[in-house]
Amino acid sequence: MQFSKVIDVEGALSRIRDGSVIAISGFNIATTPEYLIVKLWELYERTGHPKDLFILTDTLPAVPDRGLDFIGKKMHETGDREFLRGMLLTYLGWAPWLQRLTAENAIEMYTWPIGTASCWFREVASGRPGIITRVGLRTFLDPRNDGCYLNDLARERRTCSNSLIEIDGREYLLYKAPKPEVALIRATTSDELGNLSMEREGIFGTVLAISQAAKSCGGIVIAQVERLAKFGSIKPKEVHVPAPLVDHVVVAPEEYHWQTCSFRYDPRISGEIIPPRASYSPLELSERKVIARRVALELLYLAKRLDRPLFVNFGIGIPALTPLVIEEEGLSEILLTSIEAGPLGGVALTEADFGVAIGPFAVIQMPDMFTNYEGGIIDASSLGFMEVDARGNVNPSFIPGRITGPGGFPVIVTGSPRLYFAGGFTAGKRKFRIGNGELRIEQDGDVRKFVREVYKVAFNGKLALEEGKEVLYITERAVFRLSERGLSLEEIAPGVDLDKDILSRMDFQPQMGKLEEMDRRIFREEKMNIEL
């Protein structure tokens, strides 16, 4: 066909000029154009061009040694400092080589929350200067604190920024970055004209908005797909990115087109097959399941109080196990779960596969999902924590010497009206004996998580109280509530000693509420058999 946009990979990537700003889609490996990323490096390695590139992303198109982390590894091993001048990433936890480049001050590195970056592409596609939001206020992201800079080179050059503004007497942050001149995106199928469908992908991500952002400033869009179709054979409502937004289409070998880090292709992830409930295996009883069960109970109490199903979010780690508990109890229709990349329902995958779900009942675009979060449309959210202090401030993942980024955390805590932070009471090597309705601590972790002052504030307890949020901190041995006087201890696990196992393991004295025992059903092998 004379209008075909299908082209070889080098022909497409050769259109990228030195100094370009490139937007790349991807949530870990989901929607990551891994073939284009690898071949872009190989083209530079062979020819010296394109170079001096700046990369913008909606999340992190990488897992260790793959995607953008593959480029980080190559740059580190070769000592190259010319290919990239900088990046805007929302999370670096699965990109150890990019973390090294950041720590070495080899490239400029900036970070925004995922939802802010994802929605920013829509804003700039509409010709607006950036995105205005309350996300990040009074946290490390606030320009009065660290701002969005992850290293000294970023602080010096300020290619990306956020600044404090005031509207009608209320504080906001304005996030700005250079507009993309190139977009590297991924879909499943392209017809000869360049219409793209995403039927085998686990998520839609921000693929459409990234394409629009590049085209709005006269840029080019290069799409990686796994297969081709005849023009007109893709149903109109299944076209996710229409042909006018696509310049070139490259067919990738299957080894560069995985749904997630661990799955080449699973129709349950793309929603083509909905698995029966019998296919889910219950979690083994452990301290992690104990915490997830307590979160599930809190959500079920809320559903009973509101007398309707709940729309909820779960973050990575222990919170992501809560849907498994909900499924085991046969209550998935009462709690309508979501994860930030776009899936609703099903069972969320974890670790480097986080972002997709097995058997979702719906999948929406990522900016739309974050609108649900930031706008307070959801009823509640459960997120993990690394540190909590006496004022209820939370540090989810930051430690000295480790560079991660905020992920979706700041957007979710800004908008969600109810927050149930969930995690282990201590960290390190621990051993528990759980059963018969009790928890026994045989060896405790040597790392304290309830500290006098958190290392980085990603959730501001005082601001949450001002905005009327309900906040709980749920662990395997204790449950705290955020009050005007700070953290208040409300529940302890049966079998746990208050002074030895809780108060002596904290760096501050919590307020003492009406102390109750945690529900003993949480600590038994059998199902909780919850009735609403």
Image (cartoon, grey):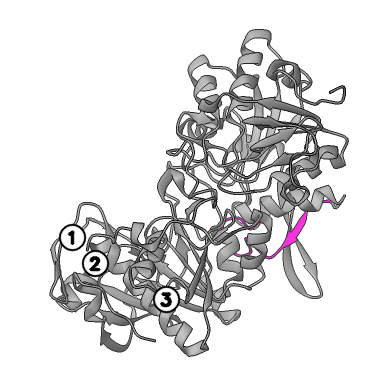
Question: Would you call the spot at circle 2 few (<14 residues within 10 Å), some (14-19), or many (20 or more)?
Answer: many
Region of the chain picked out in magenta, as a range: 129-143
Q: Kindly identify the amino acid type of the residue bearing the numbered disc 1.
A: Asp
Q: Kindly identify the amino acid type of the residue bearing the numbered disc 2.
A: Arg
Asked if disc 1 and disc 2 are in contact, CB closer than 8 Å, the reply is: yes
Percent x, y of residue 457: 51, 61
Q: Residue furthest top?
A: 46
Which residue is labeled 1 in the image? 444
Give above or below for 442 relative to 176. below
Asked if disc 3 and disc 2 are in contact, CB closer than 8 Å, the reply is: no
Q: Is residue 171 left or right of residue 467?
A: right
Q: Nearer the viewer, mark 3 or mark 2?
A: 3
| Kind of element beneath mark 3 | strand
Residue 131 lies within the magenta run: yes
Distance of mark 3 from mark 2, alpha carbons?
19 Å
Which residue is labeled 3 in the image? 472
Q: In the figure, residue 12 lies in which quadrant? A: top right
Give above or below for 373 relative to 310. above
Which residue is labeled 2 in the image? 505
Which badge, 3 or 2, comes first in the chain's sequence?
3
| Kind of element beneath mark 2 | helix
Give above or below for 397 relative to 277. above
Distance of mark 1 from mark 3, alpha carbons?
22 Å
Q: Nearer the viewer, residue 294 or 56?
A: 294
Residue 489 lies within the magenta run: no
